[in-house]
Image (tube, grey):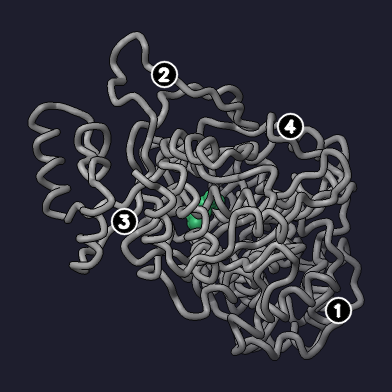
Amino acid sequence: MDYKKLGDLLFPNITKTPEDYEGMYPKRELPEGAKVTRLGPSPTGFIHLGNLYGAFVDERLAHQSGGLFYLRIEDTDDKRYVEGAVEIIINSLKFFGINFDEGATMDGDIGRYGDYTQSHRGEIYQCYAKKLIEEGKAYPCFLTEEEISEIREKQEAEKLNPGIYGQYAKCRQLSLEEIEENIKAGKPYVIRLKSDGNPDQTGDDVRRIKVEDAIRGTLEMPENFQDVVILKTTGIPTYHFAHVVDDHLMRTTHVVRGAEWLPSLPIHVELFEKLGWEAPVYCHTAQLMKLDEEGNKRKLSKRKDPELSLDYYRNQGYHPAAVREYLLTILNSNFEEWRMDNPDEPIDAFEFTTDKMSNSGALFDLNKLNDISKDVLLKLPASEIFDFLKSWAEEFKPEIIHIFDDRAYLERILDLGRNDNKPRKDLIYAQQIVEFISYFFDDMLKIEDEMPAEVPAEDIPAILKAYLESYNHADDQSQWFDKIRSIATEMGYAAKPKDFKKHPEEYKGHVGHVSTVIRIALMGRAQSPDVWEIQQILGEERTRERIGSRI
Ligand code: GLU
């Protein structure tokens, strides 16, 4: 067969040659060892934790090595395209501190290795498909869907590997004339790779490929034998072909992607080989898992787990520094130890490595994220938390924007109990913080808890009245508590909880129950940080008003 003629027949409009593209996209001039990484999200409008997890690896590998990290929009599957999705990708990642050096941006491409949107690269893919056709390494396939299902049924019945390969790849046999006729008759066709792999993968002579994965070490798997589609009937490439062409021409050195791509690795290896290119270093990241209610590990699912979406963290108001810190703990097994030894170092001082990454499933745990978030927020000055909360509220909770009117007041609230020897770690994420501090604002104060059962109903106004009468805003903490203790003893409550425990028959309750009455009158809750400190922040007038209104 005259393959050159076949190439011209199938791609009459492709005038550029592979050499042209090699010249347009030369090897990058970067220092020795510099890594070039990329994120290739599909613009589905859903950006998930896995994207951020992968992006984080990309970003660290590139920037730690003096290389660069670019964004490529993988929109070859137009069924999944959602308007505005690119903006969502860029903004969400930026929020979490992931910045690209090159690639698609809201204002067009940056960098000389574009176009960075796959749907704009049709001619490039076709040029390389043409090259493979001309070399007899690919062919047009006219099998209809029905024919393909028939083949599959037959293979299933005979317990053979499903797919188009070997004897089932009928269109491999077509002559140039038959192909010409089919095209003239307007029959749709795809371009398939003509695989050299051996379909018999059972015998001793199964050929296996070996790939050094930066996370997983040496991978050994049977070679590809499927005549996979590289260009669809529309001329649009499949993921396999686009990945190979783009990562070669954009000079990617490290491909970080999810473990779901491992099964297609042999296809990619064969494609790189057939195109005569060196494959990049693959880094297949672990699946994100969680423990379900029964304690079983399972994959995070879009349907069941809202925390898979990055939007979740923004809506809830997690501080990006907390999310980054948490991601590193699941990404690198030695991070936590490093953090303990270097509590005040900026996170980027940690040397991230792929060989410390888990390959058996990274366990994602919201409780752990919350714990880390507490520590991260504890290190942030109140003024910074104020600014973060405010910008979060502007976007997600505008109805509470008035709480930011008095900066000094809110900053004191945020700092409450944080400067002690054993600092409080009450602050986790914006939604929770706003709820936690709501009682400081009259319009958000709610009585949430019941008065203690030990205190009879008629004692409540009496306790509050006595409290109000004895209240002196200038009292220090111990003077203040002495007064509560005397109110308690005068009214038949033990001055110390342990006295009550020893002789419950002698008392109604103890001083703790009395102070809970005061706490609930002031804050609506039985649990809160130190009451004396809260009163100092609320101010004398508001304190008296709150107590007075409950008598
Ligand atoms: N577009 C692919 C995805 O969204 C990217 C995979 C890759 O990084 O190669 O899953």
Q: Residue at x 49, y 63 (%)?
A: 42
Could you tell which of marks 1 and 3 lies nearer the N-terminus? 3
Name the residue carrying label 3.
Answer: 190
Residue 452 seen by the camera: no
Q: Residue at x 43, y 39 (%)?
A: 264
Circle 2/circle 1 CB separation < 8 Å: no
Dividing the picture into quadrants, the one containing residue 11 is bottom left
Q: Amino acid at mark 4?
A: Asn
Q: Mark 3 or mark 4: which comes first in sequence?
A: 3
State the separation of the CA atoms marked 3 and 4: 48 Å
Pair 3/4: label in front: 3
Q: Where does the image place residue 439, in percent across and percent down from the top left?
A: 65, 77
Answer whether labels 3 and 2 touch (C-beta < 8 Å).
Answer: no
Type of amino acid under label 2: Arg
Residue linked to disc 4: 334
Q: Earlier in the sequence, mark 4 or mark 2?
A: 2
For the residue pair 337 and 24, the one nearer the viewer reads as 24
In 3D space, how far apart are the residues under numbered discs 1 and 3 (Cα atoms)? 86 Å
Q: What residue is drawn where x is 56% and y is 52%? A: 245
Give the distance between the C-alpha atoms of the residues marked 3 and 2, in whole angstroms: 27 Å
- Circles 4 and 1, Cβ within 8 Å, touching? The answer is no
The quadrant of the image that shows the C terminus is bottom right
175 left or right of 213 in image: left
Residue 160 is situated, as x and y percent measured from the top left of the image, at 18, 28
Q: In terms of image quadrants, where is residue 401?
A: bottom right
Tell me the distance, in whole angstroms, between the alpha carbons under discs 4 and 1: 53 Å
Q: Which residue is mark 1?
A: 472
Disc number placed over residue 207 in the picture, else none: 2
